[in-house]
Amino acid sequence: MAETEPDSESGDESLGDLFGRLVDDAKGFGQAEVDYYRTLVRERLRAAKASLWMGAVAMSLALAASVALVVGLVFTLAPYVGPGWATLIVVSVALSLASLMGWLAWQQIKRVMGELP
């Protein structure tokens, strides 16, 4: 007669029991991997958050320096051409540079997106 019950004295387990343990172990391993990557992502997001704050402060300081430079250029040119013309010259040059940079950025975006050969 064939035995269907595991032999408790010899420690033999049925194939079904072994497969069940394998599935349980695989689920545990998968959950441990998910928990590991979840923790890893949280840690990297925390580090990225700090970097973004530092970048925002750096950009704010750079913008303030740019404004100071433009105002300084207006004050420097004002004795030579008058305050109105100095403002017009500095604003025109700044807008021309901004337009050129914007156009170049747009061309680069189109090239990256594949619209240009």
Image (tube, grey):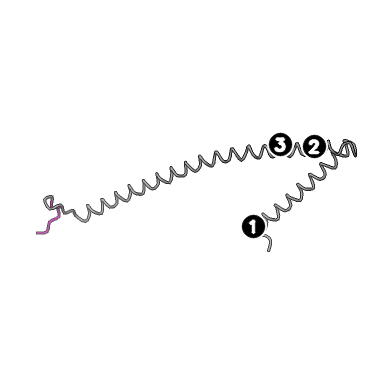
Residue lying at 50% horizontally and 39% vertically, measured from the top left: 46
Residue lying at 68% horizontally and 56% vertically, measured from the top left: 110
Foreground label between 1 and 2: 2
Q: Position of residue 43 (x, y in %)?
A: 47, 41
Which quadrant of the structure image shows residue 64?
top right
The C terminus lies in which quarter of the figure? bottom right
Which one is nearer the viewer's eye here, 80 or 107? 80
Q: Does the magenta stretch mainly form a helix, a strand or a loop?
A: loop
Which one is nearer the viewer's eye here, 69 or 105? 69
Q: Which residues are magenta?
A: 1-7
Q: Position of residue 99 (x, y in %)?
A: 76, 48
- Determine contact: label 1, label 3, CB under 8 Å: no
Q: Which residue is mark 2?
A: 72
For the residue labelled by badge 2, is the local secondary structure a helix, a strand or a loop? Answer: helix
Disc 3 residue type? Ala
Residue lying at 90% horizontally and 39% vertically, measured from the top left: 80
Q: Residues within 10 Å of mark 3 (few under 14, many from 20)?
A: few
Q: Position of residue 15 (x, y in %)?
A: 21, 56
